Amino acid sequence: MTEHQTQSDRAPQGQNRRRLLPSHLRRPVIGAPMAGGPTTPELIAAVGEAGGLGMIGSGYLDAAGTRAEIARVRELTYAPFGINVFLVDRADSEAALASAGGPDAVVRYADAIGRVARRLEVALAESPGFTDFDLEATLAALVDDPVAVVSFTFGIPEPGVVRALQDVGTAVVVTVAGVADARRAVEAGADWLSVQSAEAGGHRSTTTVGEEPDDITTVELVRAVREALPEVPFVAAGGISTPDDVAAVLAAGADGVQLGTVLLRTPEAGTSTLHRSALGDHRFTESRPTRCYTGRYARALVNEFVAEFHEAAPAAYPYLHLLTGPMRKAAAQAGDIEVPPLWAGSRWRAADAYADRPAAEVVAELWDRAVEQTG
């Protein structure tokens, strides 16, 4: 923890404090909540100490795991931080699965990818069912032990959920992929938005599983949302890897930025050795949104698994996420770069310039140079 922080900085998050907006940050840079390992407490602390906002990716944690991550971050920093929650809806998931052909579609996909699992000497998960990743208990924990920001991915929270969090001092953020969802999020009471384009690495935050992704760029989406909602604060997410990228979205109307891929190779990130290697491997020439790992569109480098099974994967989230979990883990442990998901935004190659640099330096350089450009 740094010495320059004031006593007000040390106040418990969520208590007797105004709800945090991007404009309150020294540098309005959000560290993307990359669930599953890359976003560590150390990365969150580093982004916060640089004047930004680090975010816990709690998507696949239960309530106890979320509480434990909060405690770990608080051991490292007094800077404000937030938590991202996956808002997974059973009715939506079941409707998408039914449209894709029902449970038989998952069985057929399991048969198609079975030989990959057998080669890795691991069994696919049997009869994967629905899970919302302990959503209700996690939300209760975040009301009981508030943090500065709670953001939502994959859906628009009910107004009652928004109010409960705001009542304990938490700012509510909704990740949206289009203007219509941005309007809905504001109507639900969101304090600000994360506007995520098709260029973003990892999962796209469409609000339904079955939705087909568009190919809108970050700058185009920022302009559209700013025109539709001129007074609403929001940050831009997707393919932001250089000061020029930051300057472009600020000029288009964003109040800040969210960085993901460019932080994956920082020393503080928990990115696997395999994933780090792939991001710098010039054999990979394309990243693509694909359902083949989780049943929901997520942008990854095109390795052999993506190339072969992209077309076969049904819209079946979270069923495919559970189905392929053992295979993905086994491939990563075996060092097989052609099987596991290698999440990467559209401009992952531009992030080479920041490989192995401390996260605080990356945040400061991208923001400060962009501000110099925009005046």
Image (spheres, helix red, strand yellow):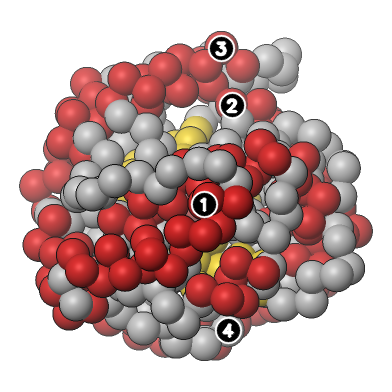
Mark 2 — residue? 41
Q: Amino acid at mark 1?
A: Ala
Whole-number angstrom distance, CA of label 4 to CA of label 3:
38 Å
Q: Are marks 2 and 3 in contact (CB under 8 Å)?
A: yes
In the image shown, does 264 or 241 lie closer to the viewer?
264
Residue at 14% from the left image edge and 64% from the top image edge: 94
Quadrant (top left, top right, bottom left, bottom right) of the C terminus: bottom right
Q: Amino acid at mark 4?
A: Thr
Q: CA distance from mark 2 to mark 3?
A: 9 Å
Element type at mark 1: helix
Residue type at the position of mark 2? Pro
Q: Which residue is mark 4?
A: 217
Mark 1–mark 2 distance (CA, rounded to whole Å): 32 Å
- Alpha-carbon neighbours of circle 4 within 10 Å: few (<14), some, or many (≥20)? some
Q: In the picture shown, does residue 63 fall above or below 324? A: above
Residue located at (25% from left, 49% from top): 128
Residue 204, image x, y percentages: 44, 67
In the rendered structure, the answer to whether residue 276 lies left or right of residue 98 reads right
Task: Write the residue at 44% across / 22% down.
Answer: 70
Q: Position of residue 39 (x, y in %)?
A: 59, 38
Dot placed on the residue nearer the N-terminal end, 3 or 1: 3
x then y, percent, for residue 111: 38, 64
N-terminal-most mark, 2 or 4: 2
The residue lying at 37 percent from left, 33 percent from top is: 61
In this picture, residue 22 sits left or right of residue 89: right
Give the quadrant of residue 101. Answer: bottom left
Could you say which disc has been placed on residue 117 in the image? 1
**C-alpha distance separating marks 2 and 4:** 30 Å
